[in-house]
Image (cartoon, rainbow, N blue to C red):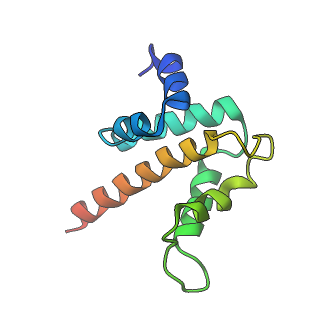
Amino acid sequence: MEDSEPFELDWLLRCNLEELIASVRPMSDKNCEQIVRAILDRIGGPTFEQLLARIVETMIPRDGRGPPTNSDEFYFAIRDLFPQVPPENDVLGRLLCFAMRMCQLRIEKNRLTAH
């Protein structure tokens, strides 16, 4: 991904929703992480670890409820970490798409190795 990264990142940040979904689906967790880090480098904000901590906190609420079933809850959970990004810009939704896919793949991988 190194040589084509700027072009690929630019394309991933402007493609339509169907293209985004089709692009994310076959990616590995490592590719998703690289894209999350590249987006964070581009837009600024929290560290990769801070972003993941907020996502995990949202997945496992302290009040004992189950994880949110609505993706908007994850979006609103991270929104305050990026005050510099205008609300009408969909970069945070795309960032969250890659981060959530990475988390999903890593959880699945850990379940398989735990058995």
Name the residue furthest top: 3
Name the residue furthest right: 84
Q: Quadrant of the N terminus?
A: top left
Q: Quadrant of residue 43?
A: top right
The residue at 65%/31% (across/down) is 41
Q: Quadrant of residue 114?
A: bottom left
Exactly how many numbered labels are in the figure? Answer: 0
Name the residue furthest bottom: 64
Seen from the viewer's position, the closer of residues 89 and 27 is 89
The residue at 80%/47% (across/down) is 83
Seen from the viewer's position, the closer of residues 79 and 42 is 79
At which x and y percent is residue 81? 73, 51
The residue at 52%/69% (across/down) is 59
Q: Is residue 27 above or below residue 78?
A: above
Looking at the image, residue 43 sits to the left or right of residue 71; the answer is right
The residue at 34%/38% (across/down) is 22
At which x and y percent is residue 90? 63, 41
Q: Is residue 30 above or below residue 64?
A: above
Q: Quadrant of the C terminus?
A: bottom left
At which x and y percent is residue 82? 74, 46
Q: Is residue 70 above or below residue 102?
A: below
Looking at the image, residue 3 sits to the left or right of residue 80; the answer is left
Name the residue furthest left: 115
At which x and y percent is residue 102? 42, 49
